[in-house]
Image (spheres, coloured by chain):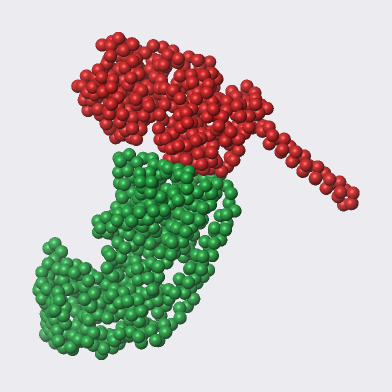
Amino acid sequence: MTDLSRRSTMGLGLAAGAATLASRRARAQTPAEVKIAMLVPLSGPWARQGILEQMGARLAVDDVNNAGGIKSMGGAKLKLVEYDTQDSAEKAKDAAQRMIAQEPELVGGFGCWLSTFTLAATEVTERAELPWLTLSYSDLITGRGFKHVFQSSPTADRQAEEELPMIMDLAQKASGKKPTKVAFIGDNTASSVSFMKPMRAHVVADQGLTIVADEVYTPPLTDATTMIQHVRSGRPDFVVFQSTNVPDDKLLADKFAEFNMKSDRLPKIGGGGHWAVPELLNVAGAENLEGILVGLANWPGKRQADLEKRFMARTGEPWFGHDSIFAYVHVMILKEALEKCGVADRRKVSEAIHALDMTDGPALFFPDGHLKYDEKGRRVGAKLCVVQWRGGKPVPVYPPSIATQDVLWPRV
Amino acid sequence: MRYGSTPRLKRDLITLGVVSVAYLAVSTFVTNSYYQLIMTLLPIWAAFGVSWNILSGYGGQLSFGHAAFFGIGAYVVTLALVYWNLTPWLGIPLGMIVAGCAAVLIGLPTFRLRGHYFALSMLAYPLAILYFLQYLGFQEMSLPMHRENPAAFLEFTDPRLYTVVAVGLLIAAIFVCMLVENSRFGLALLAIRQNELAAEAAGINARLWKMRALVTSGMIAASAGGLYACVLLVVTPDSVFGMLVSAQAVVVTLFGGVASVWGPVIGAAILVPLAESLNAELGNYLPGIQGVVYGVAIIGIMLASPDGLFWTIRDRFFRPKAPAPLPVSLAASAPPPTRAATAGSPLLKVEGLSRSFGGLRAVSQVSFEVNAGEILGIIGPNGAGKTTLFNLLNGVLSSDAGSAILGGESMLDRKVHQVCRMGVGRTFQVARSFPRLPLLDNVIVGAYGAGLADAEAIASAAQALERVGLAAQAGLPAGQLTNKQLRLMELARALAGAPRLLLLDETLAGLGRDECDDVLDVLQRLRGEGMTVVIIEHTMHAMMRIADRFVVLDHGRVLASGLPREVVEDRTVIEAYLGKKWAAKQDA
């Protein structure tokens, strides 16, 4: 090789190096991508809920990117990185640890559906100062003084305080009469226990109700006959279920139907997203579920009719529900915060989420139409909403902002 | 300290120091927070493995439920922090105390079981605690974050500091393990593991040592669990009491090497990073890949080297050098061989001793006396009740009736090791050795069993080996000895406890004529030194040479007793041995 050619080769190399550096710097100024994370159960017993979240999140990311990305950042695209909590708190926390280590550019994220997983994972995200949005209910999640965790659902203790008054209200409006007797059937898991505590302590008495049956079982439920006999002999005006999984829900719905106490004769209220999933319809059947009310933290209402159609067309799911809409709105909230701060910096994004106070845009994906988090990270004014099984589909009936139909309550 | 432990201890401590420093040096260069976590988990799991190794590796008491102690440590730290705001620096020691108490409560009923039954019932404890905690509502506990003065609450912003604490914990655990291994504690455990009955017959209180091992082991496991909680930040019953937690301790130890200080460390050093980095890289696509790695590792290691990597590597590449003979001075410092007993006076008096198994009267109304300094031969056809008689005398079996008085004290209704402490040495029909231990250690077990202190025990064992003529083989593992040497080893082990009375069960069984003569010479020499011996034997010619008197048993009863010549000419004895026809022929 001659001197000349060696020199020219070197020159070429230097030039190439400079070009790479230049392009890298250019990318740093306006990132082509902004990474957000989703950490949900994609395997194990809760995988179905995680997959429903995944569907909503992917739809949201595509919607954002198709609409031109983050405008304040030169049209930067959102990139969703997905992590699996698997089936235990330990693994969820481990996945969070991996996520933080492997994706240093993350600006925010959401998950993990089950409160246990969220509690574990946020111990990691909080230490990494990563803003984290969650639909989980446990009040512990935002009771730890964390600065970067945002809880969009009403907390479990709030739900307990709200549910009965809301039901009483619905019943009065629909039937013109205030119920006076209530029966409870619930399991003994943590969330049920914490839900029932304020109920038994004062909520029931505050509403002028008497408890005529209070049945507690250890899941999985194998036989509901004796419990239902107790409930029947108490002649309650309505029943509140505090079960935590689909098989137990199915058994309860079936048994009440068998005892000729479907919801046209005895109103029933279930709590939690599992009472409104397609699987329950498949196993319990539309007939036995008809009329059952379900208290939930969020549900797409009439405002989202178009989105619901697109979601169903894209995923083949029979409806757009609790888990999917939460994931959708969480992506939208992160997008909104990025628009506000204009930099891919997780601390700035966290500040921007704290500063949000909106009644439009992503706020409209909540039944109460308000998006603001208090200093603890709890969404201000978060309220329960109620859906009712009608002809094999959960239909929003409360609050009026999302309701597509009026509640049905038997006039006894 | 055990004989020869000082150089081993020194070598191990140097290795420990070098490895720890190197590990910490490497950990300072790790910046990926997930790999930092792995570097912290490795010593924690290794320490947990060390704790399991003490009970199950050295002691052979297989525990599938070590998560019980690990979880207690984790939960005590967490609950103390949540409810009393007690820093984990104090919470971990508190957890160790609680786990120690739990170990006593668990050990008391569970050590009544042996082998598989013990292993399986240990499985139940963590599961029971798991449900209990769920019942109490401690499903998910998170360790509160302390923004002020985090280090005082074992919370660090730099994850590498967790690694330093974890390494410190592991060093402490290994140090305890070294102390155990190199003391009579470890020797007692090894003896129990290899042959519990032989250990007890050598005077070791197996129950007590097992309990000590369980408590020590439980406390180390609790400290590992406590630190684990601090690293995990969130504690659920499943993550600290679950089956996989118990399995972790078993797997790292089995993989690395059972009953070796380094085993759990080697196992953890290979498996934890392997599984965790596979999980880090593939966990999103192949959830549960760790479980597969552990499964494959355990199957592979069971097939390739059932004792673990450490032993396979050592046996292949670091053949232990031929052991040096014992220094002569050792034996010389031993106390005089036997306690002086007035020759001719009765030492053991057995009267009306009986024991039946259902309808079978194995030993029935047996009475005899043994005079100090004599050799009494117990003979009889197969099934005559000879071994049962010995088992009654040394506490393996309890008697239905009768008495056995040794020097004024009853031998009955005592545990095996207590009988040994009375000055009764015992050997078994099938030699019961501790095959992995060197010959000297096999014999020292007997000396420890008699309650001798370290130096005395070593001297007494060396002297016992000399008395049976095995001093040259002192360093060989018992597994490499010939049958004759094993017989002599058992004899030496019995002698090391300086007994007043030796019970020898078919010591000559399976020996060739020459070998037989060698053993007989040893016995004769012992008698010369004033030892009292009761020996069970089939081979009449050998007994004729050695025994002073005979007791003949048949169908559990004493058929005849007296001087050898009289007894062999006794008609009933001939009938018992050779049948009535033979007796009739003799008469004719």
Chain rendered green: B
Chain rendered red: A
User: Going 78% across and 42% down the picture, which residue do you hit?
Assistant: A18
User: Going 75% across and 38% down the picture, which residue do you hit?
Assistant: A22
Residue B438 sits in quarter: bottom left
Task: Indicate whether B256 appears above or below A12.
Answer: below
Task: Indicate whether B162 appears above or below B262.
Answer: above
Q: Position of residue A355 (x, y in %)?
A: 54, 27
Q: Locate the C terminus of chain B by quadrant.
A: bottom left
Relative horizontal placement of residue A58, taking residue B92 as reference (left or right): right
**Depth check: A182 or B470 in front?**
A182
Q: How many numbered discs?
A: 0
Decide if residue B496 is in sight here. yes
**Depth check: B399 or B553 in front?**
B399
Residue found at the far front of this picture: B148
Q: Position of residue A100 (x, y in %)?
A: 55, 41
Relative horizontal placement of residue A119, taking residue A266 as reference (left or right): right
Task: Indicate whether A141 appears above or below B13.
Answer: above
Residue B399 sits in quarter: bottom left
**Depth check: A378 or A218 in front?**
A378
User: Going 61% across and 26% down the picture, which residue do you hit?
Assistant: A339
Q: Position of residue A263 (x, y in %)?
A: 31, 17
Q: Position of residue A150 (x, y in %)?
A: 48, 31
Q: Locate the N terminus of chain B by quadrant.
A: bottom left
Task: Indicate whether B21 appears above or below B72.
Answer: below
